[in-house]
Amino acid sequence: MLSHLPIFPFTAIVGQEDLKLALLLNAVNPAIGGVLIRVEKGTGKSTAVRALAGLLPDMEVVAGCLYGCHSKGLDGLCEDCQKRKVADNGLPVARRPVPVVTLPLGATEDRVLGTLDLEAALHEGRKRFEPGLLARAHRGILYIDEVNLLEDHLVDILLDVAASGINVVERESVSFSHPARFLLVGTMNPEEGELRPQLLDRFGICVEVKGILDPTARAAIVRQRLAFEADPKGFLATHQPSELELKQRLEQARALLPQVQVGEGEMALAVRLALALKTEGHRADLTTIRAACTVAALEGRTAVTLADVKRSAVLAFRHRLANPLDDEEMDTDKLIEQVEAVAQSNPTIPFEVVVPEKKIL
């Protein structure tokens, strides 16, 4: 969970523009599906994730709920809240910060899923559930460092929950379920092994984060960190205006997002890029369009541009190419060149969307 210690402000992070953009896009539009960060050690990725939570408004929850259920049931209600709603004809409301929950590599299945007290269920006739990490992460951020080293059975659990949005715990003949929807943020060092394809595709977008080589920028990073450590309150006060401005920008983008329109040319470009770069499945072009709409909303526009599509395609395609990017030469710059080459190879021709006729047999 978030520490009580001061959190380094998001707007004070130097460089790492792709990482910051990827996190902001998901903050505005959770449908994008999370972020995978291919990263070198010591590049501030966990700092950025926790700083993002500081930009998000407090959640409206059912007072006393262990799972952070929304008082209006927008993300589903746990069994306890369902019973309380019927009994009290309504649910009490409280507010709490967006949680950031870290899933450690050595976590047991019980710690991740939660545990059921079988004795209480069998002998007392009631379910007693001890929430796990997935319950704590509901409506927040689930952060997994070195996700590629996660044990296979935990990967399977995450796949099931990510697909359904519900965590189901079964022991013997007793079961318990609760909503579990979260922004999934994972980091990995490709040198330590690749990620299973099933989980890889669950991340909406992927960014490559490397250490900054520019001496001036590196010096700025050191100065910012030392200033924060010397006087956290003063440092936060200095950056409060920029933090508030970014918070307002995120709120405005969320409100504007439903109004953003995608033209036929922009849609055609997303599809052509997916076909030309041989991405697997349909998530690449779908995520590209979702991200492009969100980029437009962040910039206060209601129309997606070709530049939005190209920028978003780099984030959405990186981990979905037919040949995984295990070649050191296939870095972000090369992927950008490929996207530009495809975009320039043929003018984007608008096309008519035709819904296939449904067949019974």
Image (cartoon, grey):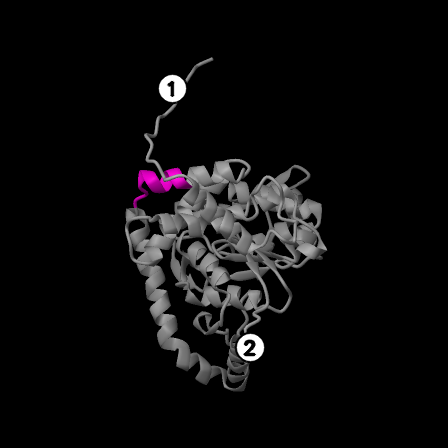
Q: Which residue lies at the image location 33% right of the left edge and 65% below the top edge?
A: 248
Q: Residue furthest front?
A: 345
Where is residue 76? Give x, y as percent.
44, 45
Report crowding for label 1: few under 14, some 14 to 19, many 20 or more residues within 10 A (C-alpha). Answer: few
Quarter where residue 26 is shown: bottom left
Looking at the image, how many numbered discs can be counted on the residues? 2
Q: Which residue lies at the image location 62% right of the left edge and 45% below the top edge?
A: 324
Q: Tell me, yes or no, whether the highlighted magenta stretch contains residue 203.
A: no
Front position in the image: 341 or 2: 341
Q: Tell me, yes or no, whether the highlighted magenta stretch contains residue 262.
A: yes
Question: Which corner quadrant holds the N terminus?
Answer: bottom right
Q: Residue furthest bottom?
A: 230
Three-letter amino acid code at disc 1? Glu
Q: Is residue 306 toward the left or the right of residue 223 in the image?
A: left
Where is residue 201? Give x, y as percent.
56, 43
Q: Is residue 230 above or below residue 6?
A: below
Front position in the image: 223 or 258: 223
* Circle 1 residue: 357
Front position in the image: 332 or 74: 332
Residue 315 image label: none
Q: Which residue lies at the image location 53% right of the left edge and 86% below the top edge?
A: 230
Q: Is residue 177 toward the left or the right of residue 235 in the image?
A: right
Determine the main secondary structure of the stretch shown in magenta.
Answer: helix
Where is residue 310? Give x, y as percent.
42, 49
Three-letter amino acid code at disc 2? Pro
Residue 215 image label: 2
Residues under labels 2 and 1: Cα distance?
A: 60 Å
Report crowding for label 2: few under 14, some 14 to 19, many 20 or more residues within 10 A (C-alpha). Answer: few
Q: Secondary structure at mark 2?
A: helix
Q: Which residues are magenta?
A: 261-269
Which numbered disc, 2 or 1, marks the residue that appears first in the sequence? 2
